[in-house]
Image (spheres, helix red, strand yellow):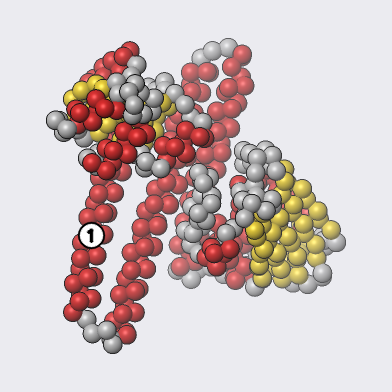
Amino acid sequence: MFSLKILITEDDTVSALLLKKALEKNHHEIIGIADSGEMALEILSEYRADIVMMDINLSGKLDGIKTTEIINEKYNIPVVYLTASSDSETLQKVAVTNPSAYVIKPFNIRELNMVIELAIFKDKKEKELQNLNNELEEKVKQRTADLNEANKELQKALEKERELSELKSRIVQNVSHGFKTPLTSILSSAQLLKQYAERDHPFKVKIMKHATKIENSVRNLNSLLTSVLFFGKADADKMNYKPMRIYTSSFLNEVVDMVKAGVENGVKIETHFEKLPKMITSDMDLLYQILENLLSNAVKYSKDKGQVEFKVWSDGEKLMATIKDQGIGIPEAEQSQLFDRFFRGKNVGLREGSGLGLSIVKKCIEVIGGKIDFESKVNKGTVFHLEIPIK
């Protein structure tokens, strides 16, 4: 790993010295140790730093979050938070400062090195992307000044270029975030499992807890990969309707069981399967994608320990279904974008997601020849209605 100039901002002297020793062991240069936000800003005014390790709770009037806001505005230096707190309230506070990384105490050297590398890489790519965006904006302004406003075809071409640029940006943001979060969780939990495994059975509960975290993170990563591959196939026009005979109840229960296995917020799925034929004819893979994505979303965006209703029935020629939750709902102004790729509502908060699930559902519905519509109100929930041909 390359050598970096690092400023440590930590009000616990022992923690600061341990961190200094760990960083110097990896050939980094510590330009200073500050126990307050004021001292950190004073050091940065005199010395250049490549990265700042920032504790949230500091002595002095400025806490770590306010100090980071000033550093972002004045120096544009990547900041890695160091804290013993991982509650949602703390995460929401630090998220608005766009930190380069977030490390929970206590940490090990390997994890620390990985986080620093990711922080530097993220900062580098963001600056490169910003420079490219600035260059592109300047070129567009220059070209626009020379263009004839009456040339509609050229205007359409420029608009298409802008849309492609936005799409690429969304891909970078969503896919990068989708990979980083589960992989970090896998690494941290695996390290904890090794420690607990060396001890006796009293730690069985903890082992199970972190094993579940690994399982859920891997499932999230696999889902993201599946989504990306799905659209690669769809864009290449390689998606075909492949009907087959399906055991109805067995298939529906399998979908529900798979979604239940990934539930982390205590949400219950209540099923109502009525007037169903023993077997139906449809594309099993496409039907699975439709139901699994809708159910998973209903669970994800429900309130903790809430309830999702999954009703399925048949009129003989079509499979009818409704999936209803009592979650955060979809803002009315955003409902027209719901099935767009990479779209995520402004009210989703810190919930993980790539914004691909519902666009996959829409594509599958088109291929399978079905219909989908929905009703939704903010903080009241959402209900999706499906009609799937089964003959």
Taking the spot 23% from the left edge, 59% from the top edge, the residue there is 134
Dot 1 amino acid type: Asn
Q: Residue furthest front?
A: 61
The quarter in which the C terminus is drawn is bottom right
Which class describes the residues within 10 Å of circle 1: few (<14), some (14-19), or many (20+)? Answer: few
- Asked if 354 appears above or below 371 in the picture, the reply is above
| Residue 235 appears left or right of 129 | right
Asked whether 257 or 147 is in front, the reply is 147
On the image, numbered disc 1 is attached to which residue?
134
Q: Is residue 196 above or below residue 381?
A: above
- The residue closer to the viewer here, 56 or 359, is 56
Q: Is residue 340 something that shows in the picture?
A: yes
Residue with the most extreme right position: 275
Q: Identify the image quadrant of residue 373.
A: bottom right
- Which sits in the foreground, 110 or 44? 44
283 with respect to 180 (left or right): right
Locate residue 386, reporting x and y percent.
Answer: 70, 65
Instruction: Estimate the x, y position of residue 119 in percent, counting from the top left.
Output: 31, 38
Identify the secondary structure beneath mark 1.
helix
Residue lying furthest bottom in this view?
150
Q: Position of residue 124 (x, y in %)?
A: 25, 45
